[in-house]
Amino acid sequence: MRQFTRATLAIVLLTGAAVGMAGFATRANAEDPPAPAEEETFTIGMKNLLPPEIFDRGLVVTVGAPLDEAIEQPIAFTHERHVGTLGMDCNYCHSNARKGIHAGVPATSVCMGCHSLVDTTERPELVKLKDYWEKGEVIPWKKVHDVPDYVYFSHKRHVVAGLDCQECHGEVQDMTVNERVAPLSMGWCLDCHAQHESIDQNYGTKAELRRAELKDCWTCHK
Ligand code: HEC
Ligand code: HEC
Ligand code: HEC
Ligand code: HEC
Ligand code: HEC
C-alpha cells in the first residue's frame, strides 16, 4: 500500500511539473497581459490536479489514532490534571516544539523531577511510572498524531509564526485522555495555509506570495 502511494505521489508530482511547463508555454504565446508576478510562479492549483477524493483522505492513509477517540496509554497520564489543574506550560514537557520538527514526548526523568516526591500509596498509575523509571525502560506511549513519512511537517515553523497548539490539537488542557481532533489530511493543511491570519500579519504586502508558496507541492513533499 505504501509503495503504491509513493508511486502515485511521484507520478502526480511529475505530471504536475509537466502541466506547469505546458502552462508557461501557453502563457508566453497568449496575447493577454501577463498575470501578476506572484501568480505566475504557481500556475497549478491543487484542485485542478487531483481527484476530489484526495481531499477527504484520512481513510487510506494512517495519520495516528482514530479521530475523536480515546486510546489506552501505558500510564493514565492526564493533561487535564497537569495543565488544567496544576497550571503547567506545554513547553515544560514539549520544549522541542519551538526548536524542531517534532514536539516530542518528555523523558521519564522529566516526570520524576516531581514524581519522586509525590506519594504513590494507592495510586497504581504512579507505581507503574516508578517501575518504568527504576527498570530504566522507556514508556511506550502510543502515537495520537502521525502523518505519513512522505509529508514534511515542522512544529517550529508553526509555533514561531505564533500559532497556538490548540489550533491543531484542540483543548488539550481539558483532556483526561488525549484525542486527535483534526483530520491531518492534505485538505486540512491546505485550507489553513490558504487563509491563516498570521500570514497577513507576518508578511504584509508579501502575504499573497507566501500563500502561494504554502500551497506548492514541494513545501510538504520534499
Ligand atoms: C507534564 C508533562 C506534559 C505537559 C505539561 C504537557 N504534555 Fe502533552 N504529552 C505528555 C505526555 C506524557 C504525552 C504522551 C501521552 C499522551 O498522549 O497522553 C503527551 C502527548 C501530547 C500530545 C499527543 C502526542 C501524539 O502522540 O500525537 C499532544 C498533541 C500534546 N501532548 C499536547 C500538549 C499541549 C498542547 C500541552 C499544553 C496545553 C501539553 N501537551 C502539555 C506530557 C505533557
Ligand atoms: C511539575 C510536577 C509534575 C510533573 C513534571 C509531572 N507530574 Fe504527574 N502529577 C503531579 C502532581 C502534583 C499530581 C497530582 C497528585 C495528587 O493528586 O495528589 C500528578 C498526578 C499524576 C498522575 C495521576 C495520579 C493518580 O492516580 O491520581 C499521573 C498518572 C501522573 N501524574 C503521571 C505523570 C507523568 C507520566 C509525567 C511525565 C510525563 C508527570 N506526571 C509529570 C506533578 C507532576
Ligand atoms: C499547524 C498544526 C500544529 C500546531 C500549531 C502544533 N502541532 Fe503538534 N502536531 C501536528 C501534527 C501534524 C503532528 C504529527 C506530526 C508527525 O507525525 O510527524 C503533531 C504531533 C505532535 C506531537 C506528537 C509528537 C511529535 O512531535 O510528533 C506532540 C507531543 C505535539 N504535536 C505537541 C504540540 C504542542 C505542545 C504544540 C504547541 C507548542 C503543537 N503540537 C502545535 C500539528 C500541529
Ligand atoms: C491552523 C493552520 C495551519 C495548519 C492546520 C497547517 N499549517 Fe502549515 N503553516 C501555517 C502557517 C501560518 C505557516 C506559515 C508560517 C510562516 O511562514 O510564518 C505554515 C508553514 C508551513 C510550512 C513551512 C513552509 C516553508 O517553506 O517554510 C510547512 C512545511 C507546513 N506549514 C506544513 C504543514 C503541513 C504538512 C500541514 C498538515 C499536516 C500543515 N502545515 C498544517 C499554518 C498551518
Ligand atoms: C500544506 C501541505 C501539503 C501540500 C502543499 C501538498 N500536500 Fe499532498 N499531502 C499532504 C498531507 C498531509 C498528505 C497525507 C494525508 C492525506 O493523504 O491527505 C498528503 C498526501 C498526498 C498524496 C497521497 C494521497 C494518497 O493518500 O494516496 C498525494 C498523491 C499528494 N499529497 C500530492 C500532492 C501534490 C501533487 C501537491 C501539489 C499540487 C501536494 N500534494 C501538496 C500535504 C500537502
Image: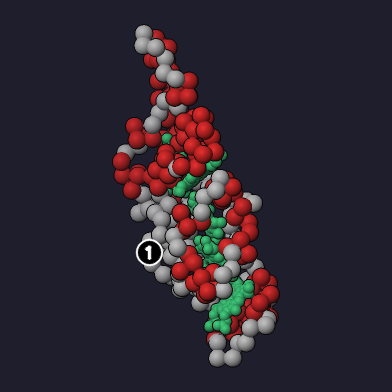
Coloration mode: secondary structure
Above or below 198: residue 86: below
Above or below 129: residue 107: above
- In the image shown, does 170 or 152 lie closer to the viewer? 170
Question: The residue under label 1 is which amino acid type?
Answer: Asp
Q: Residue at x 34, y 32 (%)?
A: 48
Would residue 11 be found to the left or right of residue 52 on screen? right
- In the image shown, does 143 or 60 lie closer to the viewer? 143
Residue 40 drawn at (x, y percent): 45, 22
User: Looking at mark 1, is its residue's CB closer than 8 Å to ligand 1?
Assistant: no
Viewer can see residue 84: yes
- In the image shown, does 51 or 79 lie closer to the viewer? 79
Q: Quadrant of residue 136?
A: bottom right
| Disc 1 packing (10 Å; few <14; some 14–19; many ≥20) | few
Residue 126 drawn at (x, y percent): 58, 82
Element marked by disc 1: loop
Q: Residue at x 65, y 68 (%)?
A: 107
Q: Residue at x 38, y 31 (%)?
A: 45
Above or below 87: residue 129: below
For the view shown, which residue lies furthest in the bottom direction? 122
Residue 194 drawn at (x, y percent): 42, 39
Viewer can see residue 216: no
- Specify the quadrant that holds the C terminus: top right
Q: Residue at x 49, y 67 (%)?
A: 173
Above or below 172: residue 137: below
Residue 84 drawn at (x, y percent): 51, 70
- In the image shown, does 167 or 132 lie closer to the viewer? 167
Residue for badge 1: 68
